[in-house]
C-alpha cells in the first residue's frame, strides 16, 4: 500500500466520521488546531510543474476551461503558461508557478487556499461567511456574504478572489479543499487525486508534519529544514516542503501571531472605551457645570451686595422724600382738590359741546395703508 | 434669494419650492447639474455591469478610493461633530455655541453619505444589514466599525433633528430631544472613539501587506487622535467656506462668535497635533523603523509628519497666540489635506507596497467621478438645509440652543 493512499484513507475516513458538525470560530490564545483536522502537504522536490492539478481542480469544482476564462488563458497542457507569474481568480482556485531558484534548479510551487488553523479571512468577515471546519477545510457561505472584501484584505496569502463583473450576485471564490464536492463523499481532493508524482499528500495534519519531517531527515541536502505552514500566523492545514528557501517561492514571511491575536487587543479595548469615557466625560461635564454654578453664585453674591447698597441708598432717599411730602401734604391736598374740580368742569363741558372731528387726516391714513398692502 | 432675505421674519419659515429652472441659473449650478448627471450615469453602470465595469479593483486590491476617500476620509473629516458637541456641552466652552449646529449638520451629512457611498462599494448592498441584524461576525474589526457607524449615524440624526423640528415648528418633540442632549453627546463621543480608532485597526490584521512605517500596533490610537484635529480643522475650514457661500443665512450671533471658534479650535488643534507628532515618533522608535526612513517611502513619510502635522501645528499655535484667524484657516486647510494624505498612505500607499509596480492600483475615472458626485451631494444638501433650517442662525421661537 502506497503511503499516500494510506494517509488518504485515514484522512478521508476521519473526515467522514466527524462530518456533519462544523467547528466554531477558533479561540484566540494557544490554539493548537483541531486534533483530527486534515490537510495537504505539497512537496516542491517532487513537483514537476505538469499543471495536472490545475486541470483536476477545474473538473472537481465544475469550473470553466482556460479558453472560457474572462481573460482567456492557454490550455492546461500548455506548459509555456508557467513562464508567467500567475495568481488565482474567481474561475481558477489553484495555480502552479515556476521559479528559477538560487540553487540553479527550476522549482515549482502550487498555490491555493492554505486553510489556516486560525484563518484571517474568517476572523475578518463581519457576517461569519467564512467558517473553519473541525475537519480542516475553511469554507465559505455564499448566501451570507455582503461583498465587503475585507477577507481579501486580511488574508496574508492573497487567496480569496472576487467576481467583480457580476452585478447581481458577486461572490468570493477560493479553494475549498473540495469539502462539499469530494471530501464529504469520501473522495480525495481533485488536485491530490490527479497528481502523477505524489507531490501532494492528503492526510491528518499531525501526520503530514511527521511525514514532512521524515522526508527532510531521510534526504539530507534535498530539502531546506523548514515546513512552511507549520507555524505561519498560527499554522495552516496546507503545508509545504521545498528544496530552496520558501521565500524564494514567493511564500510571504509571516510571524507566528495569528490573525485573531493581531486584532484582539483593539477589539478588547472597546469595553474599556465604553466604560471609561462616560466617567471622564461625566466628570468634565459636572466640573464645567460646577464651574458655571460657582461663577453664577459669585455673580449672585455680587449682585446681592450691590442691591443691598442700592436699597439702603434708596431708603434714605425715600425717607427724605416722605418727610418732604409730609410737609407739603397740606398744600398738596388743597392743590389736588382744586385740580379735580377744574377737571370735572372740563369733562362736563366736553360732554355737552363735543369738538369737531378731523376727517382729512383719517383719509390720508387709510390711503397710506392701502399703498403698503400693495 | 436676496429679495426674500430682506423680510426678516420670512427667513425662519421658508416653504420648500422646487424650481428645476434654477439648476441652470449660474455657472456653479450648471456644474452641479453636470456632476449629478455623471453620478447618475455611474450609478446605472455600477448596478448593471458590476464593480468591474466602473472600478479598477482586482484580487490584489479589493479596496480602492471608495474606501480610502469615501469611507476613511469621510468618517475622519466628519469628526467635527463629536469635537464640537463635546467642547460645548461637556467641557463648557460657551463660545462654541454657534459652532454646534453647523458641525452636527455636516457630521450627520458626512456619515449619512459614507453609508450611501458604501452601497456602491460592497458587492451586495442589499445585504448591508446582515452584519447587524442577521449574522453578526463579532470577531471582525469591520463589524465593530459597521455597528458603531450605524449607531452613530442614528445619534447624529437625532441630534440634528432639533434644527429640522424648529423649522417645522414641532415644539413638543423638539423639547423631548433637547432634554437628551447630554446623554446623546456622551454616546456620540464613545461611538466616535470606537469607530475612528477601529478604522485604523482594520489594518492590524495584515502586517505582512503593510509598509512598516505605516503599520503599528498603535494605528488605532493614531486614527483616533488624528480624528480629533481633523474634526476641529474641518469645523474651521467649513466655517471659512460657509462665510463665503452662505453668509446670507448667518445671524449676528453666529458672525460675532465665528472668530472665537477659530481661535479656540486653533489652539486645541495645535496641542493635539503636537502630541500626535510625538506619539508618531514614539511608534517609530518602538518598532525601530528608523532604517526605513532612508527610502522613497521614508521621504514621503517624513513629508507627511513634518509637512502635514508639525508645520500646521506650529501655524495653529502662532495663529492662536497672535489672534491671526487667517493663519489658522490656512493651517486648517493644510491639516485637512494632511489627514486625507495620511488615510491614502495607509490604505493605498503602504498597503501592498511590496507588489511590483505593474500590479498596483490606480483608480478608474468613474471611481473618482463617484467620489466627486458624493461630495457634491453633501455640499448641495448642506446648502439646502442651511437655507431652510436654523443652522447658521438661531430661530426666534427658541432660546439659544
Ligand atoms: S489562506 Fe487565506 S483564505 Fe485561506 S484560510 Fe488562510 S486566510 Fe483564509
Ligand atoms: S467579502 Fe464576504 S466573505 Fe469576505 S469578509 Fe466580506 S462579507 Fe465576509
Ligand atoms: S483542494 Fe480542491 S479546490 Fe483546492 S486546489 Fe485542490 S482541487 Fe482545487
Image: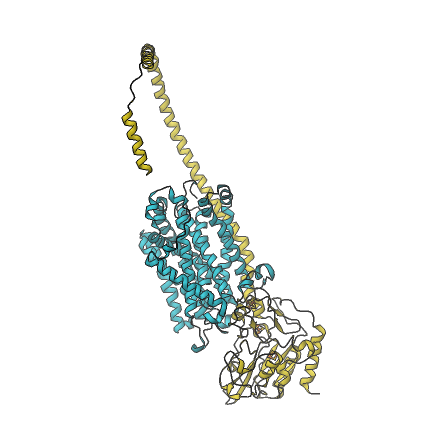
Picture quadrant of ligand 1: bottom right
Rendered location of residue A156, percent (x, y): 53, 73
B56 or A314, nearer to the observer: B56
B382 or B346, nearer to the observer: B382
Rendered location of residue B222, percent (x, y): 46, 62
Colour of chain A, in one word, is: yellow
User: Where, quadrant-wise, is the C terminus of chain B in this rendering?
Assistant: top left
The colour scheme applied to this rendered structure is by chain
Rendered location of residue A276, percent (x, y): 53, 53
Q: Residue at x 39, y 66 (%)?
A: B304
B171 or A187, nearer to the observer: B171
Tell me if residue A212 comes above or below residue B237 in the rendering: below
| Residue B218 seen in the current view | no
Tell me if residue B391 comes above or below residue B222 in the rendering: above
**Relative to A357, is A305 on the left or the right?**
right
**Relative to B292, is A155 on the left or the right?**
right
Q: Residue A1, located in which quarter of the rendered image?
A: bottom right
| Residue A184 seen in the current view | yes
Extreme-left residue of the structure:
A360
Tell me if residue B47 comes above or below residue A332 in the rendering: below
Colour of chain B, in one word, is: cyan
Q: Total of numbered circles in the picture?
A: 0
Extreme-bottom residue of the structure:
A104
Q: Residue A124, located in which quarter of the rendered image?
A: bottom right
Rendered location of residue B382, percent (x, y): 41, 53
Amino acid at each position: 500500500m502506497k503511503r499516500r493512499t494510506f494517509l488518504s484513507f485515514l484522512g478521508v475516513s476521519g473526515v467522514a466520521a466527524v462530518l456533519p458538525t462544523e467547528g466554531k470560530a477558533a479561540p484566540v490564545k494557544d490554539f493548537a488546531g483541531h486534533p483530527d483536522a486534515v490537510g495537504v502537504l505539497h512537496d516542491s522536490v517532487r513537483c514537476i510543474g505538469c499543471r495536472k492539478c490545475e486541470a483536476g481542480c477545474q473538473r472537481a469544482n465544475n469550473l470553466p476551461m482556460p479558453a472560457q476564462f474572462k481573460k482567456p488563458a492557454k490550455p492546461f497542457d500548455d506548459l509555456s503558461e508557467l513562464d508567467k507569474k500567475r495568481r488565482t481568480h474567481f474561475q481558477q482556485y489553484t495555480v502552479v508557478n515556476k521559479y528559477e531558484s538560487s540553487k540553479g534548479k527550476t522549482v515549482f510551487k502550487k498555490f491555493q487556499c492554505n486553510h489556516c488553523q486560525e484563518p484571517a479571512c474568517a476572523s475578518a468577515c463581519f457576517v461569519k461567511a467564512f467558517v473553519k471546519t473541525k475537519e480542516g477545510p475553511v469554507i465559505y457561505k455564499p448566501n451570507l456574504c455582503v461583498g465587503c472584501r475585507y477577507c481579501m484584505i486580511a488574508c496574508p496569502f492573497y487567496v480569496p478572489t472576487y467576481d467583480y463583473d457580476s452585478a447581481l450576485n458577486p461572490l468570493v471564490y477560493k479553494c475549498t479543499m473540495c469539502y462539499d464536492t469530494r471530501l464529504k463523499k469520501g473522495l480525495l481532493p481533485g488536485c491530490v487525486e490527479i497528481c502523477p508524482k505524489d507531490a501532494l499528500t492528503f492526510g491528518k495534519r499531525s501526520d503530514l508534519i511527521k511525514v514532512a519531517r521524515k522526508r527532510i531527515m531521510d534526504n539530507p541536502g534535498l530539502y531546506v529544514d523548514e515546513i512552511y505552514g507549520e507555524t505561519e500566523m498560527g499554522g495552516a492545514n496546507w503545508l509545504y516542503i521545498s528544496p530552496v528557501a520558501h521565500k524564494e517561492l514567493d511564500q510571504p514571511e509571516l510571524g507566528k501571531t495569528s490573525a485573531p491575536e493581531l486584532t484582539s487587543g483593539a477589539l478588547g479595548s472597546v469595553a474599556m472605551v465604553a466604560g471609561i469615557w462616560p466617567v471622564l466625560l461625566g466628570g468634565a461635564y459636572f466640573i464645567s457645570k460646577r464651574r458655571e454654578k460657582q461663577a453664577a453664585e459669585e455673580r449672585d453674591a455680587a449682585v446681592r451686595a450691590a442691591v443691598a447698597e442700592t436699597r439702603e441708598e434708596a431708603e434714605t432717599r425715600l425717607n427724605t422724600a416722605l418727610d418732604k411730602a409730609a410737609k407739603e401734604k397740606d398744600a398738596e391736598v388743597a392743590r389736588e382738590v382744586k385740580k379735580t374740580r377744574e377737571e370735572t368742569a372740563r369733562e362736563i363741558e366736553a360732554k355737552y359741546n363735543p369738538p369737531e372731528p378731523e376727517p382729512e387726516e383719517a383719509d390720508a391714513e387709510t390711503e397710506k395703508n392701502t399703498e403698503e398692502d400693495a | 434669494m436676496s429679495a426674500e432675505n430682506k423680510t426678516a421674519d420670512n427667513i425662519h419659515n421658508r416653504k420648500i419650492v422646487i424650481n428645476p429652472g434654477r439648476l441652470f441659473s449660474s455657472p456653479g449650478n450648471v456644474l452641479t447639474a453636470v456632476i449629478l448627471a455623471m453620478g447618475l450615469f455611474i450609478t446605472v453602470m455600477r448596478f448593471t455591469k458590476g464593480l468591474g465595469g466602473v472600478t479598477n479593483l482586482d484580487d490584489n486590491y479589493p479596496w480602492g478610493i471608495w474606501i480610502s476617500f469615501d469611507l476613511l476620509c469621510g468618517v475622519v473629516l466628519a469628526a467635527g461633530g463629536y469635537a464640537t458637541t463635546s467642547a460645548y456641552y461637556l467641557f463648557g466652552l460657551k463660545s462654541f455655541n454657534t459652532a454646534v449646529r453647523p458641525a452636527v449638520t455636516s457630521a450627520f451629512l458626512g456619515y449619512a453619505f459614507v453609508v450611501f457611498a458604501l452601497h456602491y462599494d460592497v458587492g451586495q448592498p442589499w445585504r448591508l444589514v446582515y452584519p447587524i441584524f442577521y449574522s453578526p461576525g463579532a470577531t471582525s474589526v469591520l463589524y465593530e466599525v459597521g455597528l458603531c457607524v450605524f449607531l452613530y449615524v442614528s445619534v447624529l440624526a437625532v441630534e440634528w433633528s432639533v434644527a429640522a423640528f424648529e423649522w417645522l415648528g414641532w415644539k413638543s418633540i423638539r423639547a423631548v430631544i433637547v432634554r437628551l442632549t447630554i446623554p446623546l453627546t456622551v454616546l456620540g463621543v464613545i461611538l466616535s472613539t470606537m469607530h475612528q480608532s477601529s478604522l485604523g485597526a482594520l489594518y492590524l490584521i495584515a502586517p505582512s501587506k503593510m509598509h512598516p512605517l505605516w503599520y503599528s500596533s498603535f494605528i488605532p490610537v493614531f486614527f483616533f487622535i488624528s480624528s480629533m484635529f481633523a474634526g476641529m480643522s474641518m469645523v474651521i475650514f467649513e466655517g471659512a467656506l460657509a462665510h463665503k457661500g452662505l453668509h446670507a443665512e448667518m445671524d449676528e450671533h453666529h458672525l460675532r462668535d465665528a472668530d472665537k471658534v477659530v481661535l479656540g479650535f486653533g489652539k486645541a488643534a495645535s496641542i493635539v497635533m503636537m502630541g500626535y507628532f510625538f506619539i508618531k515618533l514614539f511608534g517609530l522608535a518602538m518598532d525601530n523603523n528608523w532604517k526605513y526612513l532612508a527610502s522613497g517611502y521614508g521621504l514621503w513619510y517624513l513629508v507627511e509628519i513634518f509637512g502635514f502635522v508639525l508645520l500646521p501645528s506650529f501655524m495653529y499655535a502662532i495663529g492662536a497666540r497672535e489672534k491671526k484667524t487667517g493663519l489658522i484657516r490656512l493651517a486648517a486647510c493644510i491639516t485637512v489635506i494632511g489627514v486625507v494624505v495620511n488615510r491614502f498612505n495607509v490604505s493605498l500607499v503602504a498597503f501592498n507596497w511590496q507588489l511590483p509596480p505593474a500590479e498596483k492600483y490606480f483608480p478608474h475615472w468613474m471611481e473618482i467621478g463617484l467620489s466627486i458626485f458624493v461630495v457634491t451631494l453633501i455640499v448641495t444638501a448642506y446648502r439646502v438645509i442651511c437655507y431652510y433650517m436654523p443652522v447658521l442662525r438661531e430661530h426666534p421661537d427658541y432660546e439659544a440652543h
